[in-house]
Amino acid sequence: MSQDLFQAPDYYLLDELLSDEHKLVRDAAREWVKREVSPIIEDAAQKAEFPTQIINGLAEIGAFGPYIPEEYGGAGLDQISYGLIMQEIERGDSGVRSTASVQSSLVMYPIWKYGTEEQCKKYLPKLASGEFMGCFGLTEPDYGSNPSGMVTNFKDNGDHYLLNGAKMWISNAPFADIAIVWAKNEEGRIHGLIVERGMEGFTTPETHNKWSLRASATGELIFDNVKVPKENLLPKKSGLGAPLGCLDSARFGIAWGAIGAAMDCYDTALRYSKERIQFGKPIGAFQLQQKKLAEMITEITKAQLLAWRLGVLRNEGKATSAQISMAKRNNVQMAIEIAREARQMLGGMGITGEYSIMRHMMNLESVITYEGTHDIHLLITGLDVTGLNAFS
């Protein structure tokens, strides 16, 4: 078992922009990842298993709903703290960060923002502690980038709703206790419903044979005449803007998380470049290798500044969906390119599980697609700057 020697790069002294609380939160997450995630994650990825034993630890470092008010079991932290926690977790593994992101932004966030006081008190404390795990059902087999076309629907059956349809590519689905499901009512309006495991007709088959996010559990949500109590409807917001608001929060977390994956790849390549001797000297002494490393730290630093400024805007309630899209797209692209360059620097060793780079690279192939593909986010920026809609 290799020792986690990670040292976080901070080329522009961004720590000086963080509060003492930010640094305490980040350092606690960083140490937990080194202690609990790094020693087991390669084995979990090789076995394609989510390490459920880390759920309690994720809760303890505040990874589940860190910005949720303390009265509902959250830590009451700000958005930069949330981002820093996601950064540190994804430094360990994107799949583990996905589990935390889904729980926080796609399950707890909609209950907190769109739910009733009764729903908040019933679900949020258990989700914050990890006693309950959740998932988010928006994507369907035929509707990914175009979620408004969804066919999952529910009908009013007097004392309950009758839910039918299917969702796919759902993180946490195989073990989730509850699902936040987006479906159309009889008028075609999109609403959120809280669906609980054990409801008759609700099943969550697992997705197998993934080459990416192998340490994350992915599945489907199948609804066959599921009776959902009327009190499980999220009443405070409907329409496509409701799930997209959740995705804004999750994409913000991804923009930070991707930096963690990039930092880990850079740190691994930098250390290797000083240790690997070829032609009588460390490969880090060669110009082409220095070019790669210099470009990596430059792009990481730019991404750190982008994420920090976005966090400030989120804290002030000023961040737009388009600004979040830009950060998600830029930072994930940055991370995947660094992973590819770092892999080349390690040569053949870069494809082995002895190093984290190939695992990060495979994981990022999913991160660049989910919660808005790379190209969709490009068009969101295009729409924002031109006012011209390329989607229709």
Image (spheres, rainbow, N blue to C red):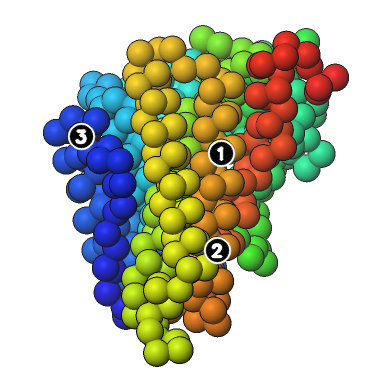
Distance between mark 1 and mark 2 Cα atoms: 17 Å
- Asked if the residue at tag 1 contacts the one at tag 3, i.e. Cβ–Cβ closer than 8 Å, the answer is no
Examine the rendered structure and indicate whether residue 141 appears above or below residue 341.
above
The percent position of residue 216, horizontal first and vertical second, equals: 51, 57
Distance between mark 3 and mark 1 Cα atoms: 24 Å
Examine the rendered structure and indicate whether residue 339 appears above or below residue 307.
below
Q: Which mark is residue 16?
A: 3
Circle 3: residue type: Glu
Residue 264 located left or right of residue 340: left
The percent position of residue 200, horizontal first and vertical second, equals: 62, 40
Please tell me in which quadrant of the rendered image residue 181 appears. top right
The percent position of residue 172, horizontal first and vertical second, equals: 52, 48
Q: Answer few, some or many: residues within 10 Å of disc 2's Cα (few below 14, many 20 plus, some between 14 and 19).
A: many
Please tell me in which quadrant of the rendered image residue 183 appears. top right
Residue underneath mark 1: 330
Looking at the rendered structure, the secondary structure element under dot 3 is helix
Residue 82 located left or right of residue 391: left
Comes first in the chain, label 3 or label 1 = 3
- Asked if the residue at tag 3 contacts the one at tag 2, i.e. Cβ–Cβ closer than 8 Å, the answer is no
Circle 1: residue type: Asn
Q: Which mark is residue 341?
A: 2
**Which residue is at 48% across, 68% downward?**
287
